[in-house]
Image: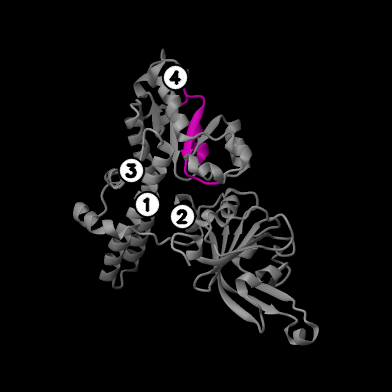
Amino acid sequence: MRSGYLSQYFAAVAAKRLSAVEANPAASNQHEFNGVEQLKTLFGQAQEKQRFPARFIYLDDTDEEAVTADGYLTWYDARAKSADRTGRSEHRLYFPSTAVSQCATEGDLLVIGRQSNDDVLVIVAEGQSTIERQLLWLFGFDDIEHPGFSVRGELESGRDRIGYAARVILEQIGIETEEREESFLEDMFRRFDGRFPSTRVFSEYARRTLSDLRPEDDPDATLMAWLDREEILFRTLERELVAERLQKGFANDIDGFIAYSLSVQNRRKSRAGSALENHLEYLFTLNNIRFNRAPVTENKSKPDFLFPGITEYQDKNFAEARLTMLAAKSSCKDRWRQVLTEAERVRRKHLLTLEASISEAQTDEMKARDLQLILPAALHETYSVSQQHWLMKLATFIKLVTSRQTQ
């Protein structure tokens, strides 16, 4: 097990596409996965029936919350009794009917992960969805279009290193990464008086802890480094503050506990989007770019960034070709369509996201709607080759708005 790699959380993973029989919830209460011989890497040579505690998850691109269920997997060799005589084995893997299996359909992606604590994570992702592509990228599966399982063990190669994008996907499947920067904890407690500061203040603090970056020369790498550092620092401080609150306890105040839990989750979600905007704002300022952040345009919409600003936007004599709008969303799902209604004078919209491996169906629709997707350069590799030709880097966008500003 190596810290900072997938091996920290998974001993091995396997993936395949669900067949019609596997995805049929009406077949029986006990279902069998096909082509399981390869799963010996995960579960070993079976003798008597072995049961493994399992967490089942179903994910798609529509629902904000995953469908989950707890259960078990049964692993055994149907020919174990005659193995000494015949030399043959016939391994089988059974799973029970759950709310997750009821969501599954033929062609969905199935991922089975043997975790470091010997529990098993069983993930079903909607076929051809963004989350399916993210899981394939995360676990390094290049080809699953064949019968049976593809299996990967010893998850410690370069592609298995956990960065910002991988950390986000892991959290979607219920795994909270443990990377911390304890050396900054005492300083953060002193500076912030044992509380969470505003997102703007925290973003500025995160940037100051990194001094060897080249923001003007490589804005793509700089943005990812700032975001990664802020995320780790935030989790370091959060872990300490939440632990202190839990130690105080909630007595019999169930509503208070639920409210506190929700506040922790909501802070995480809102902070991620604000951090992205904060760091972009600083990068644009470093590059002497004129802009307004969240100005009010038609129908009270508030685009995240408007270039060169709201004054020029409201001036009907100012050339529309020199106006630029940028939306910034740490994750997209279907929310990217909201961008299309913002800043009506700007025909071609730009959207910067940190979402890895968005499906080709979604990016094709973006192109058809005249929405240009921007990602930091390091995330381009998570997309297909055909998509990469179309994607824009942050550095390219900065050059675009700079040229329009100097016309």
Q: Give the x, y percent position of residue 206.
A: 31, 47
Q: Give the x, y percent position of residue 126.
A: 62, 54
User: In the rendered structure, which disc, 4 or 2, sits on the residue that comes first in sequence?
Assistant: 2
Is there any visible trace of residue 96 in the rendered image?
no
Q: Which residue is mark 2?
A: 167
Q: Is residue 7 left or right of residue 290?
A: right
Hey, what amino acid is under mark 3? Asp
Q: Quadrant of residue 208?
A: top left
Residues at circles 1 and 2 in contact by the CB criterion of under 8 Å: yes
Q: Which residue is mark 1?
A: 231
Quote the CA–CA distance across marks 3 and 2. Answer: 23 Å
Q: Residues within 10 Å of mark 1 (few under 14, many from 20)?
A: many
User: In the rendered structure, which disc, 3 or 2, sits on the residue that comes first in sequence?
Assistant: 2
Camera-side mark, 3 or 2:
3
Q: Residues within 10 Å of mark 4 (few under 14, many from 20)?
A: some
Q: Which residue is mark 3?
A: 212
Q: Residue at x 31, y 69 (%)?
A: 253
Q: Residue at x 39, y 28 (%)?
A: 306
Q: Residue at x 44, y 59 (%)?
A: 4
Q: Residue 322, which numbered label? A: 4
Quote the CA–CA distance across marks 4 and 2. Answer: 37 Å
Quote the CA–CA distance across marks 4 and 3. Answer: 34 Å
User: In the rendered structure, which disc, 3 or 1, sits on the residue that comes first in sequence?
Assistant: 3
Hey, what amino acid is under mark 2? Arg
Please report the bounds of the magenta region as a residue range. Answer: 336-357
Q: Residue at x 71, y 72 (%)?
A: 28
